[in-house]
Image: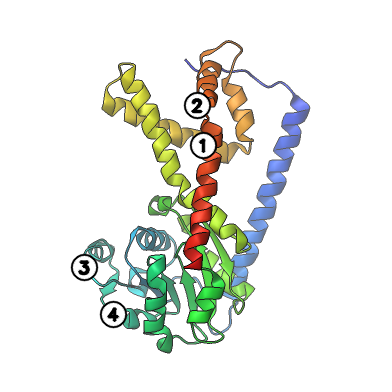
Amino acid sequence: MADAVTYRSNGLTRSMRRLRVHVYVANHQKAVRRRRDAERIPGRIKMNPDAQQRIGFIGAGNMAFGIAKGMLSGNVLPANIKVSAPSSTHLGRFQELGISVTHSNTDVVCGSDVVFVAVKPHMIPRVLVEVSQHITKKQIIVSVAAGVTLAMLEELLPENSIVIRLMPNLPCLVQEGALLFALGTKAKGEDGALLLSLLHCCGLVEEVPEAWIDVHTGLSGSGVAFVYLFAEALAEGAVKMGMPSALAHSIASQTVLGAGKLLRDSGKHPAQLRAEVCTPGGTTIYGLHTLEQGGVRASVMSAVESATQRARELGKK
């Protein structure tokens, strides 16, 4: 049975509630302004059922599929999305959603207002050289390639191209992603607002300085796998103590889900939530002591650092 202690500092609780309200209101107002800006973009299609942006994806991997699913849960219609890939291996799942597919990257670029380049980093130069002559100054090119900088993208694309660098993560597949994007030198605020309007159903979406994108790759892009490893270890610990494997994995996944939702929705610092589960001499503090002895905190921090450095290395190749 989980141990728990109750915080009784009413003043602290009220202050935290007020802070969370102020943060929520500020973020909400910012999102509303961005949506309004997106609807005012001259010469571009408004985000409503009567007039849709044409969206293209070069690449049909999990990131492209997750983003496309998120868009479909918003205002984007399947008929306004087209996906290209060299083989048909991953195109079937897009077709099941009513999305058009092709093997021609050029077809995607020529028929799209916003083009997501969702290929592996080492493929970016070849793909952009292939389609660059068909890219216009009115299109928005969104790169999803880890480590590939805005400077590299702008060097490969025609002069004055509108470029945005985006880093999503795997939970986009269930519309619970964490997505950060940075604007290129020719991209304007309304371009970011448009992208935000397209992606808002994919999960948490924020515009940030480009320097944070690689950190986000280590924290959230790769961090998803770190969480899965921890969930696997939780389940294996329960199996070792006698619980059936299927039940252990089910409980582990629900534990991760519930802990994450509480962390996000409560607005509390992780350390405070952790303290709320620990009573003096109880089971949880004994378990945490064992984790600290194993260096779990330092290992996780080092994992984020290593993944971030690797993302930066990919951008230099």
Q: Where is residue 261 in the image (x, y as percent from the top left)?
A: 51, 38
Could you tell me the amino acid type at mark 4? Ser
Marks 1 & 2, CB-CB < 8 Å contact: yes
Lower position in the chain sequence, tag 4 or tag 3: 3
Residue position marked by numbered label 2 in the rendering: 294
Q: Mark 1 or mark 3, which is nearer the start of the sequence?
A: 3
Label 4: which residue?
104
Which percent across, then down, holds residue 171?
A: 42, 50
Task: Identify which amino acid the numbered label 1 is placed on.
Answer: Ser
Which numbered marker is on residue 299?
A: 1
Q: Label 2 amino acid?
A: Gly
Q: Residue 88 carries which label?
A: 3
Residue shown at 62% from the left, 24% from the top: 275
Which structural element holds mark 1? Answer: helix
Instruction: Report helix, strand or loop for mark 3.
Output: loop
Residue drawn at x 60%, y 15% as measured from the top left:
279
Give the answer, above or below, for where 32 lies relative to 52.
Answer: above
Say what secondary structure mark 2 lies in.
Answer: loop
User: Colour scheme in the image?
Assistant: rainbow
- For the residues marked 4 and 3, what is the alpha-carbon distance in whole angstroms? 12 Å
Pointers 4 and 1 in contact (CB under 8 A)? no
Question: Which quadrant holds residue 162?
Answer: bottom right
| Residue 113 or residue 151, whichever sits in front | 151
> In screen coordinates, is 280 left or right of 313?
right
Give the CA separation, mark 4 to mark 2: 51 Å
Mark 4 or mark 2: whose residue is earlier in sequence? 4
